[in-house]
Image (tube, rainbow, N blue to C red):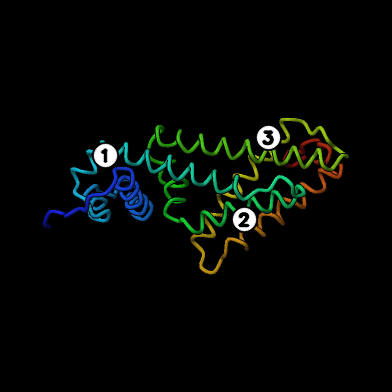
């Protein structure tokens, strides 16, 4: 393969070009299978230039995770209007999340699959992103409780647990939606909204579900 000829362009633009190629390669081939040669060729640059800009495969992957995590969080925050009712805020946030993951399937593969399974350093980057999203969703749920007036002070632990459950469900559903032909971002968001808000709505209205009383365990043959 001959040397790749590159046009002169600002470093920041060239670096984003490399990251675009890397996200596509990591997302489609996986971290271990992806090669720097392939990434350089896709970016239209030489492999030494990739190393000059981004030092190593590990640093390149970390840069991809950070860029895509920042973009996802920004998309969710931008999609939510705080002047809307609580259910509309949650709906807007879910739509923004599923729209972004559908429009950037390789980036979602990097965040949801690759980064979590190839070392603690990469996993920690995704955990930081997830914590930020969970905190944001926690604030939405707490605001919904205040808006309902009937139960303005849900226990902090319960609110945090609801946010964790909702984010976890969204992550799994996004992976499923991206792998399932014909499922749109709106459909995925509607599915999760129907699943989550029916329960949240009752909770906000002061109608939480309660487990049945514990019954004595019956021993086999007893």
**Residue 62 occupies which quadrant of the picture?**
top left
Disc 2: which residue? 95
Disc 3: which residue? 160
| Residue closest to the far left | 2
**Residue 140 occupies which quadrant of the picture?**
top right
Q: Residue at x 70, y 54 (%)?
A: 195
Please state which of the two labelled residues, at mark 3 or mark 1, is closer to the viewer: 1
In the displayed structure, does residue 139 sit left or right of residue 12? Answer: right
Dot 2, how many residues are within 10 Å of its Cα: few (below 14), some (14-19), or many (20+)? Answer: many
Disc 1: which residue? 53
Q: Residue at x 25, y 48 (%)?
A: 35
Q: Secondary structure at mark 3?
A: helix
In the displayed structure, does residue 134 sit left or right of residue 23? Answer: right
The mark nearer the N terminus, 3 or 1, is 1
Q: Give the alpha-carbon distance from disc 3 to disc 2, as whole Å.
A: 21 Å
Looking at the picture, tell me which residue is in the foreground, 73 or 36: 73
Dot 3, how many residues are within 10 Å of its Cα: few (below 14), some (14-19), or many (20+)? Answer: some
Q: Secondary structure at mark 2?
A: helix
**Residue 19 appears at what percent x and percent y?**
34, 47
Q: In the rendered view of the protein, which quadrant contains the N terminus?
A: bottom left
| Residue closest to the far bottom | 182
């Amino acid at each position: 393969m001959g040397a790749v000829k590159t046009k002169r362009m600002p470093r920041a633009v060239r670096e984003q070009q490399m990251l675009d190629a890397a996200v596509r390669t990591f997302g489609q081939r996986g971290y271990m299978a992806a090669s720097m040669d392939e990434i350089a060729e896709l970016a239209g640059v030489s492999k030494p230039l990739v190393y000059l800009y981004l030092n190593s495969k590990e640093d390149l992957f970390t840069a991809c995770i950070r860029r895509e995590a920042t973009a996802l969080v920004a998309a969710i925050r931008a999609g939510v209007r705080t002047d809307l009712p609580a259910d509309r805020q949650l709906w807007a946030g879910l739509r923004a999340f599923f729209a972004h993951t559908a429009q950037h399937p390789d980036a979602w593969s990097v965040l949801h699959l690759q980064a979590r399974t190839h070392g603690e350093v990469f996993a920690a980057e995704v955990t930081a992103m997830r914590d930020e999203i969970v905190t944001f969703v926690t604030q939405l749920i707490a605001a919904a409780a205040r808006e309902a007036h009937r139960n303005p002070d849900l226990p902090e632990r319960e609110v945090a647990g609801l946010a964790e459950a909702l984010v976890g469900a969204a992550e799994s559903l996004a992976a499923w939606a991206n792998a399932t032909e014909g499922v749109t971002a709106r459909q995925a968001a509607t599915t999760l909204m129907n699943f989550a808000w029916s329960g949240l709505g009752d909770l906000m209205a002061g109608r939480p579900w309660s487990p049945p009383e514990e019954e004595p365990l019956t021993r086999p043959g007893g």
